[in-house]
Amino acid sequence: MKATIFQGSGKIEVQEVPDPVIQKPDDAIVKVTYCCICGSDLWPYRGLEPRDAGSRIGHEFMGIVEAVGEDVKNVKPGDLVVAPFVISDGTCPVCRAGETRFCRNFMFWGSKGNDAGQGEKVRVPMANGTLFAIPKDKLDEHMMRALLPLSDVLCTGHHAAVCGEVKEGSTVAVVGDGAVGLCAVAASKRLGASRIFLISTHKDRAAIGKKFGATDIIEARGDEAISQVKLKTNTLGVDCALECVGTPESWQIAFGVVRIGGNIGMVGVPHNVPDIAISKLFSTNIGVKGSGSPAAHYIPELMPDVLSGKLDVSAIFTKTIPLSDIAQGYKDMDERKEIKVLVKP
Ligand SMILES: [Zn+2]
């Protein structure tokens, strides 16, 4: 079978690798039908995050179960499944508290000898906690593209909204117009936000944001973006700022647009972001919460809305390529030519 191998910054190769086999009783083997490239795959690609050369890469995939070990009970061969971006058991106290990202036995795709999603097949450890069956009736190509984001970006955008405490009638500002930010717009709308500002200076991304529920596009950066949001909220700022980037600049906007007593939901992996002083929170009553998303916890809640068509973020996929072209897909996303690239092995 073929799989994508990370060979160092800027170097992505498709190589022939051995077919996976069941190694443990709770393993499953999945034949990948759709996978994609994540913004976070670009950090090691850009040399900004360490990753072993020669490691498999990719953590967003769905496919058909080919084989299961004897302890796998929740999926069976032939099932269509989606996997979250973190491998989790679903049974430890942390998972049972809903925090599957921090499972006591968590593993990442492509680390510690694990397969990864950008390939033809994947061995899935702890399959009972890590695979979610999708009812197969009435699924067309469009629905597949709407379901795949459950593996990461849709659950991550939802997590931003949950951590930012978006609820019926909330005013929201989404910082970040990448796939996660756009999903945070859709998730905020689903949770009942009455007004959603999307800070975006890219017309194509802003157009998708509007389709997903953004009511106002703030076509500005930095202090100018902050003053425009303030101006449009009677100088108050928004109830919820959703930080979906993780840079000092995006954090400056998040703190700048959130109102006194509001909340910041953060899902952008922080890179060189200065620490927040507790005294700053005390003097503003602003809440800050967030992490990598517990996608396995959210999938059962979000999947029915995807299947009903109520939650459709398939428009984040701006290009579809075969696995053999994946190096070009990384390049296109790195150069921001595409929002998100879908790969069909
Ligand atoms: Zn766990």
Image (cartoon, rainbow, N blue to C red):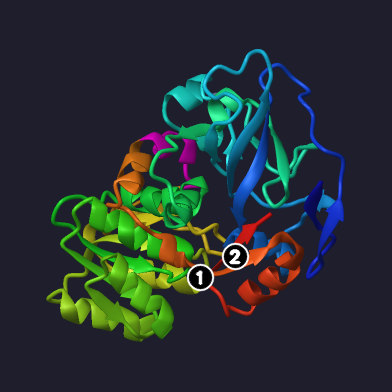
- Proximity of marks 2 and 1: CB atoms separated by less than 8 Å: yes
Q: Disc 1 marks which residue? A: 248
Q: The magenta stretch spans which residues? A: 291-300
Q: Disc 2 marks which residue? A: 272
Is residue 339 positioned above or below 18 on the image?
below
Dividing the picture into quarters, in which one does residue 79 lie? Answer: top right
Residue placed most toward the observer, 313 or 279: 313
Q: Quadrant of the C terminus?
A: bottom right
- What residue appears at the point 36 percent right and 85 percent down from the top-left corner? 220
> In the picture provided, is 308 more to the left or to the right than 3?
left
* Residue 243 can be seen, yes or no: no
- What residue appears at the point 48 percent right and 74 percent down from the top-left corner? 249
Residue placed most toward the observer, 20 or 12: 20
- Residue 170: percent from the left, percent from the top? 18, 57
Is residue 243 positioned above or below 87 on the image?
below
Farthest residue, direction top? 70
Element at badge 1?
Answer: helix
Q: Is label 1's Cβ within 8 Å of ligand 1? A: no
- Residue 198: percent from the left, percent from the top? 32, 72
Q: Residues within 10 Å of mark 2 (few under 14, many from 20)?
A: few
Element at badge 2?
Answer: loop
Is residue 342 positioned above or below 304 on the image?
below
Give the number of callouts. 2
- What residue appears at the point 65 percent right and 45 percent down from the top-left corner? 32
> In the picture provided, is 320 more to the left or to the right than 140?
right
> In the picture provided, is 150 more to the left or to the right than 10?
left
